[in-house]
Amino acid sequence: MTTPDPIRQVAVMPLPRGLSIGSGRLPVTASQRLFLCDPADRRVRAGVGRALRRLEERTGLAFARQSDSDFVLAEQASTAAWVVDWMHPGSDVPDLGEDESYVLEITPTQATLRAPSARGVLHGLETCLQLLQSHETGWYLPEVTINDRPRFPWRGLMIDVVRHWQPLEVILRNLDGMALVKLNVLHLHLTDDQGFRIESRTCPLLHERGSDGHYFTQVQIRQIIAYATERGIRVVPEFDIPGHATSWLVGHPELASVTGNYVIERQRGIFDPVLNPTLPVVYTVLERFIGEMAALFPDAFLHIGGDENNGVHWNANPEIQAFIREHHLHDNAGLHAYFNRRIHTFLEQHGKHLVGWDEVLHPQLPADSVVQSWRGADGISEATKQGFQCIRSHGYYIDLSLSVDEHYLNDPAPEGLDPAQQSRVLGGEATMWGEWVTPETIDSRIWPRSAAIAERFWSPREVRDVPDLHRRLPAVSRRLEEAGLRHRSYVEPALRRLAGDDATPSDLAALRVLVDLLEPVKIYRRNELQAEIDLLAPLTGLADCARPDSPEARAFACRVESVCSGHFASADLAAARQQLFTWKLAAETLSQGLCLRSPRLQDALPLVQILASISDAGIEALHALDEQQGPAAGWKETHEKKLELSGGAWAATELPIVGSLRQLVAAAAAGSAPAQV
Amino acid sequence: MTTPDPIRQVAVMPLPRGLSIGSGRLPVTASQRLFLCDPADRRVRAGVGRALRRLEERTGLAFARQSDSDFVLAEQASTAAWVVDWMHPGSDVPDLGEDESYVLEITPTQATLRAPSARGVLHGLETCLQLLQSHETGWYLPEVTINDRPRFPWRGLMIDVVRHWQPLEVILRNLDGMALVKLNVLHLHLTDDQGFRIESRTCPLLHERGSDGHYFTQVQIRQIIAYATERGIRVVPEFDIPGHATSWLVGHPELASVTGNYVIERQRGIFDPVLNPTLPVVYTVLERFIGEMAALFPDAFLHIGGDENNGVHWNANPEIQAFIREHHLHDNAGLHAYFNRRIHTFLEQHGKHLVGWDEVLHPQLPADSVVQSWRGADGISEATKQGFQCIRSHGYYIDLSLSVDEHYLNDPAPEGLDPAQQSRVLGGEATMWGEWVTPETIDSRIWPRSAAIAERFWSPREVRDVPDLHRRLPAVSRRLEEAGLRHRSYVEPALRRLAGDDATPSDLAALRVLVDLLEPVKIYRRNELQAEIDLLAPLTGLADCARPDSPEARAFACRVESVCSGHFASADLAAARQQLFTWKLAAETLSQGLCLRSPRLQDALPLVQILASISDAGIEALHALDEQQGPAAGWKETHEKKLELSGGAWAATELPIVGSLRQLVAAAAAGSAPAQV
C-alpha cells in the first residue's frame, strides 16, 4: 500500500489556494474553548455560533453555552484550542472586492484562524468544518496550513423565483448552502412575464395584480438581506425590463407597447409584451419604483435584465417606430440603449451600478455598467473589449441538467483575453431558472453541482482535476444536507407519493434504484416532451425525482473505462457487473409490478423494459470480456441497435449509461483481451 | 376468497360516524369541474384550492386553473363532477361548538359535499382526499354515503415551543396535519421556565430577556392564527403562571416570590421560581399583558397554566405566608385560587374564559373556567362533579413514546360519569412537550399517532378496533407526509449524519433496519439515562432517529401471536423468521462495522450484539415450533436469561420485540404444536 497523497485525505471545496497538510491531528472535544480577539463583534460571534452548532449536530458533542447560538468563550488565547483573530469587522453590507482572505493554521495543539475581515473569518470557519474528520473514538482536525483567497470577487447564484414561486425558506436554506461553498452573491430574479414577486409600496398594483399573492414582502426582503449579510453574501435584485415584462402590465397596462388586457403568463418561453420606452409615464413609474428598490436593497448593484425583447410589440406600434426615427436611434437596439441610459440616470441618483444581461451591450451603454453574459463565450470577450466589467453565466445554466463536469471546466475568463480584459471579469453566476422546479425539487438542481461551480469561481484557474472533484463532491453534498438543504432527502417521500399506497418495500427499493440511475432530459428538451405541463401544473413525476449527475452512472462509466482500457482491475469488472444486475433486477421488478399497477408509472414501462434489456447486453459484454471470448456473429449489431433505441427519453428522463454500454459492447465485439491486474 | 368488508377498502381517519360504501366508482380526471354554491366564499374557495392542489400533486393530474390556488369552476352543478354546497360561511374565527358536520355522497357520476358551515366543508374535503384511490390506469372515488359529525367539540394538539424552540414553519406544517385529521384546537404553550416565546409590546423585557431571541413576533402570531382559521382551527395560547415562570423573572425580577437574579433555565424539571401573588405590581403587569394577548388572540379561551407550583418559594417568603393568614386563604392552594380569581377578572374584561391545568381546580375557581386534566383519570371526574367543563390530556402525552394503542383506547370521558358530567367533557388534547424534540424530530413524535387520538376525539366511543386502526394508519401517515410533515423523511438524512462520511450503502441500510425497529425509551426514562444532555445540547443521536410505535415490531408481535396461538398460518411463521434474519444480519453488519468505526455509534455496540443474539433465539424458537420438536434441556432458561438482559436500554433506545420473543421462547419450550393452516 502506498502512502496516500495527504491532500487526498481532505475534501474541502472550493479547494484552497495554498494548502499544506501535516500528519498531526488536533483532537476536537467538548471541553475545548474558543478565543475570539473581539468577542463584541456580533457578526463573527454569530458566525462562530452557527459553525459550532453545526459541528455539535454532526458530532453529538455539546459545548458549554450561554444560549443555543452563543458559546462560552475562553478568556485568553493561550488556554483555547481554537483562536479566531481578525483585523476589522468589515463593512456592514458586504462590498464587491472586500478582502475575503484568511489563514488557517492547525497544529496538534491549536487551530488558529486569522483574517483581515469578518468575511474572511466566515470563509475560514467553513473550511474548518469541512476539514473535520472522525476516527473510532472521536473527532479531529488534520494538521494544515491554509492560505486562501478567492480568484474572483463576484461568485453568484441566481434564483428565479418567478416561473415557480420559491418562498422565503427556500432562499434562506440556499443562502446557507452558498455560505458553505463561499459563494458571495445571491441574485434574485424577481420579475418576469409569469409574476411580479416583490411588494412595491409605491406601485402596489404591480405585486397585487401581478403575483397571484406569491411575492416577497419588504419585511421578508429585509430578512433575506440580513440573513445574507450575516453570512457575508450580497443580494442583487433583478427587475427585468423592458422585455419579460408581462407581469408589470397586468397592474399597469398603460406602460405597454401595445394596448391590451394583460394577464399573468402561464407558459414557458419568450413573449411579446414589453414596456414602451417612448412614454413619459414609463419613466415616472420606473423612477419611483427604482428609488424604492434602491432604498430597500443596500447593494451597490441593481440588475435590470434587458434580455430577450423580441421586438414584436415595438415593431407593431407605429408611434414607437416614429420615435426611433425622430430620435435617430436607428433601430430597436438603439431604442433599448436609449431606455437603458434613462434607467441608468435613475440608478445613478441612488449610487447604484446597472447590471444587465448580454443584450444591454451597446456603444451607448454607460461605462460603469456590468454585463452578465449568458449567450455564448464571445459575450465576455466582446464586452470586456468594449471596456465593460462582466460576469459570466454562459456555461453555468444549472437548470439544464447538464453534467457538472461541463460547468466545472467552464472558466469565467475564456482563453484569449488580454490582461486588461481579464481584469474586467468580475466572476460568474450559476443560474437556476425556475421553469421546471418547485420548492420541493429546486435544491436538487442547485446542489451539490453549484459547489463545483463555486470552486471554479474561487480556486485558481489550474484547479481542474475532474476525478478529484468527484472524490470531494459526496462529502460536500453531505455537509450541504446537514446545513438544511434537501437535494437528497426530498427523493424518498417524493417516490413514496409517486409509487402510491399499494407499493411494497421492494417496489420502492426498485424505484429508488431506477431513479438514482436516471437523469432528467437535458437542455430544453423537457419543454418539448412535456409541453402540456404549464407553470400551474404539478411537478411530482419521475423526471422531478430524477436528478442530474447520477453518481451511479458516473461510477459505471469509470468502471467501464477501466475495463475497456485493457489493463483493468478485476474489481472494476465485478463492480460494473454488480451494478448491471442491480439495474436489471430493479427494472424487472418494476416492469412486472409497479409499472403495471400504478397510473403514475405507466409511461415508465418502456423505460424499465429497455433498462432490463440493455443491462443484459452489458452483462453479456462483460462476460465476453472476462472470458476473453468474442461473442457470436451478429451479437454486436443486435445490441447496438438496442442501444440506439435506448438513447431516447421516457417520462422526460434518460438513461445516462447508454454511452458506456456502447463502449462495452464495442470492446466485447472487438475481443479486447483485458489484462488482469 | 371471501368478499372483503367494503368499509375495509377505505382508510379514512377519523372514521366517519355514518359510512356506507357501494360498489360503484366515480372516476377522477383532470377534465372534471367543480361547482361551488357560493364561489365568493373565500375560505371555502381557498380550502378547495388547497385540496385540489394536494390531489394534483398526488395524482399528477392537472386541472384547469386561474392560478395555483384557484381552479376553474363549473358554471352549474349539473355539469360538475363535484358539487360543494354549504349554508353559511361560519364565524370569522372558529367557535367552540360550531356545527362541523357534513354529508358526502359519492355516486358513479357525481360527488356531492353538503355542510351547514365552511368548517364542515373543510372536514368533508379531507375525507374526500382520504377516499381517493387508484387502479391500473387512473384514479377514482368509491361510491359512499357519509354522514359525519364530531363527538367532541374540543379536539386539540398542544405544542410546547419553550423547551426547544419550534419556529413558524413547524407550527404551520403541523396545522396542515391537524386539519387533515380534523383536529380543531392548536394550544400553544408559549411561556415556561426555559423561555418566553412571544413578543410583548407592553412588556418587551419579557421576550427580549427571556427568550434567547427565539420567540414569535406578533406578526407571526397573526400569521399562525390566519393559517389556522383558514383551516377551521382555533388557536389557544397558554401563558403559564404563577409557577413555571422563570422566564418571566429574567426580565421582571420584581415579580418574583424570592428576590434573586433570574436566568433562563437550561434544565428539564420542576423549578422553584414563581410569581408573587401578594404584590400589586404582579397584577399591574399581568393586567396589561393579558389585555395585550386577549387582543392578539381572537379565541374565547386563554390558558393560564397553573401547574406544578411546588410552593418552595411561597413557603420561603414570610410576607407571602403572612398574606395567606391575613386574607384567610388557608394555604398555598388558597393563595393560588386567590391569584386565579384576580386573573379571571382580567380575562372577564376581555370576554375570555380561563383555562388551566388540573391544579387550578379549587372551590373558589370561577364557574366558567375550563380544567385541562393531565394528572390522572380522576381529574375529569372530580372537575366535572364540581361543575366545571373539562378537556382531557391525561393519557394523551405523546412526548412519552408510549404505544399509540394506549392513547387510542383512552377515552376523554372516563367510565362512571353521570350525564351531566359527561356533557361537561369538551374533548381532549394531545400534548407535545418539548424537552426531547427539535424542529427536525418533532413531527415524528406527533405523527401519525395523533391521527389515532384525533379519531378518539371525533368518532363514536364504540370505534375502538385496534387492528383496524393499524390497517388505516399507514395510509394516513402517507397523506400527512404529502401534506408536508416530515415524521418519516427526517430519518434518512439524520442517519446519514449519524453514520458519518465513512458509512457505506450497506452500513446505512443496516442502520436503517436497526432504527426502524428501535423505539425511544418511554415515560421519563430518557431524563435519567441522558441526564447530561441539557436543553442546549444537540439532539441528533440514535434515540432521536428512533420513533415510537415501530411498525416492524408491531408486525412481528402480530405474527408471533399468530404462531403461538396454535392455529397459525405458515405465512406468519415465514414472515417472522424473515424479520429475525433481517435484524440479525443488520445487527451483525453494524457490530462488525459501523459501530466499531463511528464515534457516534459506539454506545450502540452492546445493543446490536444483543439484537443479533436474541434474533438467533427467535430463529431457534421458530424452528422448534415449525418442526414441532421441543428444544434441548436448558434452552429455555438460557434464552430467558438473555431476554431478561435485553430488556434494558442503550443510547436511550429499547428493543420492542423482547416481549414477543419471550412469548415465542415459552411456546417453543412448551412444545406447542401449531396446526398448519
Image (cartoon, coloured by chain):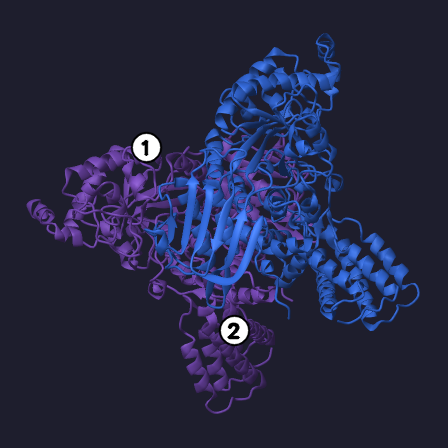
Chain colours: A purple, B blue
Which element is circle 1 on? helix
Q: Is residue A40 visible?
A: yes
Mark 1, Cα crowd under 10 Å, few <14 / some 14-19 / many 20+, is: few
Q: Which mark is residue A360?
A: none
| Mark 2 residue type | Ser
Of labels 1 and 2, the one closer to you: 2
Q: Residue drawn at (65%, 17%), measured in percent from left and top? A: B339
Q: Give residue B300's position: percent from left, percent from top.
A: 53, 28
Q: Is residue A15 visible?
A: no
Quarter of the image with the N terminus of chain A in it: bottom right
Name the N-terminal-most of marks 1 and 2. Answer: 1
Question: What chain does mark 2 sit on?
Answer: A
Q: Residue furthest right?
A: B633
Q: Which residue is mark 1?
A: A295
Which is more toward the observer, B378 or A426?
Answer: B378
Which is more toward the observer, A147 or A263?
Answer: A263
Q: Which residue is mark 2?
A: A591
Q: Give residue B534's position: percent from left, percent from top.
A: 68, 36
Mark 2, Cα crowd under 10 Å, few <14 / some 14-19 / many 20+, is: many
Q: Residue drawn at (67%, 60%), measured in percent from left and top? A: B510
| Mark 1 residue type | Ala
Which image quadrant is residue B617 in?
Answer: bottom right
Question: What chain does mark 1 sit on?
Answer: A
Quarter of the image with the C terminus of chain A in it: bottom right
Q: Residue drawn at (15%, 47%), measured in percent from left and top? A: A335
Labels 1 and 2 touching (C-beta < 8 A): no
Q: Give residue A154's position: percent from left, percent from top.
A: 37, 46
Label 1 in the same subunit as label 2: yes
| Residue B583 vertical position relative to residue A233 in the rendered view, above or below | below
